[in-house]
Amino acid sequence: MRKVVIIILLTVAAVFTVHAQNGTIRELTGDVQLKPAGASDFSPARSGSQVSQDTVISTGFRSTALITIGSSEITVRPLTRLTLAEITSAEGTESLNVNLQTGRVKVDVKPPAGTKAATTVRSPSATASVRGTSFEMDTRNITVTDGNVNWRDSNGLSAAVTVGFSSSIGGMGGIVDPVEIAEADLTVAAPAGAGDSGESSGSTVIVNEPTDGNVNVGTRW
């Protein structure tokens, strides 16, 4: 009986064991620097360089890096500095936490079937958390190109930003409603030089928000 209990405990422990992971720089252009955990200075990165937890990555002017970590890809834009705060893998779940100090990143999270990926990007102003999506963000703005992102400000207030929408952190530190940004982007001003009748050859895009929560977009000429 004791042997059976020991086997069960060992099996459970193996299931919940967390393993550290490494990422790989697949592509880079220009000046890309790495500072591994415990190092005092940066060193030049190369295609194929390994990056581990607590590595700081810095890109220079007109420099980019594409990093693969498990099922996530991070495109580091020019003049960006970030830290890979956590890269771990447990049974069927990958966890990636990135601290974005400056600059901009594009993140693609596409876990294979049967695998979960929890990716979080934190900046001094906001936090983006996803489990399988694509988005691009800097320290105050985000645009979602696939899936949904939980966008949270430094006060802990959050908003869901869905595919095709953007959000930002306003001047008072709060989240700007993605629908407000969409309305501003979709409104097209009538061109100058309209006829004397007051009619215009331009068009105005109108966004109506019915009570059922859906957004209807129409065009008035």
Image (cartoon, rainbow, N blue to C red):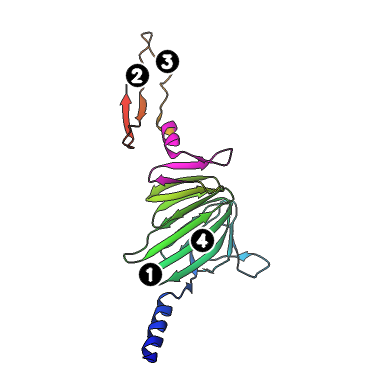
Badge 4 crowding class, 10 Å Cα cut-off, few under 14, some 14 to 19, many 20 or more, is: some
The residue segment tinted magenta is 158-184
Q: Amino acid at mark 4?
A: Asn
Instruction: Judge the density around disc 1: few (<14), some (14-19), many (≥20) Cα neighbours within 10 Å.
Output: few
* Residue, disc 3: 193
Query: Is residue 174 inside the magenta stretch?
Result: yes
Residue at the extreme top: 196
Tag 1 near tag 4, CB within 8 Å: no
Q: Residue furthest right?
A: 40
- Residue 78 image offset from top left, x and y in percent: 56, 52
Q: Is residue 78 above or below residue 170?
A: below
Residue 1 lies in the magenta stretch = no
Could you say whether the residue bearing mark 3 is in a helix, strand or loop? loop
Q: How far, Cα to Cα, is label 2 from label 1? A: 57 Å
Q: Please, what is the three-letter code of the amino acid marked with disc 2?
A: Ser
User: Which callout, 1 or 3, points at the residue further toward the start of the chain?
Assistant: 1
Q: Disc 3, disc 2: CB below 8 Å?
A: no
Q: Which residue: 41% across, 67% down?
A: 93
N-terminal of the pair, mark 2 or mark 1, is 1
Q: The disc labelled 1 sits on which kind of residue?
A: Gly
* Marks 4 and 3, how far apart at CA: 53 Å
Q: Position of residue 1 (x, y in %)?
A: 36, 91
Tell which circle, 1 or 4, labels the residue nearer the N-terminal end. Answer: 1
Asked whether the viewer can see residue 47, the reply is no
Residue on which disc 2 sits: 201
Name which residue lies at 46% across and 64% down: 95
Left or right: residue 51 compared with residue 210: right
Q: Which residue is mark 4?
A: 97
Q: Can I make out residue 133 in this image?
A: yes
CA separation, marks 1 and 3? 62 Å
Q: Earlier in the sequence, mark 3 or mark 2?
A: 3
- Kindly check if marks 1 and 3 are in contact, taking CB atoms under 8 A apart as contact: no
